[in-house]
Amino acid sequence: MRTETVVVGAGPAGLLAARELADRGVDVTIFEEHSVIGEPNHCAGILSVEGLKRLDVRPSTDFVQHEVRGGTVFSPDGTAIRIEGGSTRAYIVDRAAFDMHVAGVAQDRGAEIEVGQRVVGLTVTDGDVTGVRGKIDVRSDVVIDCEGAAGSLARSIGLPSSTEGILAGINVEVPDVSVEPNMVEVWLGSETAPGLFAWVVPIGETGARCGLACSGGNALRRLEEFLAERFGKSRHLEPIRWPVLTGGPVSRTFAGGLLLVGDVAGQTKPTTGGGVIMGGLCAVEAAKATMTAYDTGEFSEDVLGGYEISWRSAIGREFSTMLFVRKFMNKVSDERINNLFFSMKRAGLEPTLEGLVDEGDMDMQSGVLRSALTDLGMIRVLAGSLGRMALGELRRFFNL
């Protein structure tokens, strides 16, 4: 079998890359190992309003379950900082339904999707990738690898995969609980979720999607202990587990005939582990680079390397900023976080934080972080809670 471009994996990144290519007349086929698109549904399901606009995906009742305006962040000792925006900032989505929706759009534009077809290897000819191997062998000009965090295909030809900042993620649906309808909850603390945080996401009138990602210990046990403390119970539906990536992009995302996109490229937000929007933006860049290759008739690494130049130019600084902040936060003790929250509450900074969030961007976070580090009230609190050396480290990174 032959197709012009193969996409490995029918997650959002693969589907968006295929949508863009099919829209430009490329013969593109997606191979998905699972028999149903969108399963398993491993995602907290919070997608920003701005992010969906950037990906040219219109919100739809097909996949939107709820809308949120803001959130409440809890320190390890339970001190709450409430940050509510003046309008809808994000949609809570059913990720399986979201993936199916994007798949439908890609198919409408001409992409072919083969489910239940696991790609087991890459075909390499004279040093360049020229197809994939599975139940059937497929020849192609370009392979866009969106296989996910495992990265076995990329590693098989010597490309790097994520090795740092890989957390154990777990999600459950919790029925019959009362949560504030338009606000998410984020719970910090090394006892609850070392390396990231726990979350409570409203999905209806009486239900929530709850989960956490952690760098050590039994994730399910940590989650059940959190649920017992938060709701007084731990009854929940079947847990879904997946690796959450917070280590930033890998060092190289292309080879002759091959592009890496999404989780396999580490293109997730180090601050939160979210990957749909950032991976989707990189998928669009991958489609552009592939079109350039078709225009020139060359599929070598010299031509396809333009993909890495373009995505790093567009959002590489955002990844670097978020990775710095993640590494910084991982060094801050629970005690200092408690002091920070107490000091912000005492200084009356919640309106300031709400203003920063209203003006900021959930996905492109460097702007709001820079604004926070230039606000005099925030500077005083950060200096007193984290220490002047830590504040200096933050400000030097932002050249302030």
Image (cartoon, rainbow, N blue to C red):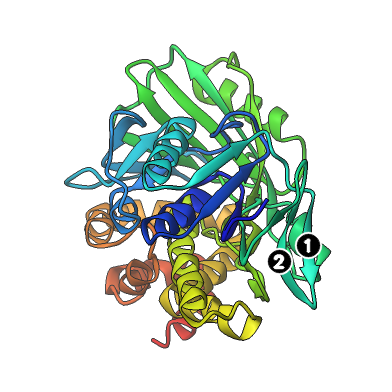
Estimate the x, y position of residue 252 in percent, counting from the top left: 66, 75
Visible in this render: residue 213? yes
Q: Residue at x 22, y 54 (%)?
A: 351
Q: Quadrant of the C terminus?
A: bottom left
- Vertical comparison of 305 with 149: above or below: below
- Between 56 and 170, the residue placed more toward the observer is 56
Q: Are marks 2 and 1 in contact (CB under 8 Å)?
A: yes
Q: CA distance from mark 2 to mark 1?
A: 6 Å
Q: Does residue 200 lie above or below 248 as drawn? A: above
Which mark sits nearer the N-terminus, 2 or 1? Answer: 1
Quarter of the rendering containing residue 359? bottom left
Q: In the displayed structure, does residue 281 sit left or right of residue 127? A: left
Q: Which residue is mark 1?
A: 123
Q: Position of residue 352 (x, y in %)?
A: 24, 59
Q: Residues within 10 Å of mark 1 (few under 14, many from 20)?
A: some
Q: Where residue 130 is drawn, which disc sits there?
A: 2
Q: Amino acid at mark 1?
A: Thr
**Residue placed at 72% from the left, 68% from the top?**
129
Q: Residues within 10 Å of mark 2 (few under 14, many from 20)?
A: many
In the rendered image, residue 308, in percent from the top left (x then y), is placed at 55, 77
Is 31 left or right of 317, judged from the image as shown? right
Secondary-structure class at tag 1: strand
Amino acid type indicated by mark 2: Thr
Is 320 displayed left or right of 108 in the figure? right
Q: Residue at 63% of width from left, 19% of height from top? A: 238
Q: Is residue 180 above or below residue 309?
A: above
Under tag 2, what secondary structure? strand
Q: Is residue 174 left or right of residue 379?
A: right
Q: Position of residue 196 (x, y in %)?
A: 59, 50
Q: Relative to the observer, which residue lies in front, 384 or 134?
A: 134
Task: State how many labels appear.
Answer: 2
Which residue is more in the foreground, 39 or 219?
Answer: 39
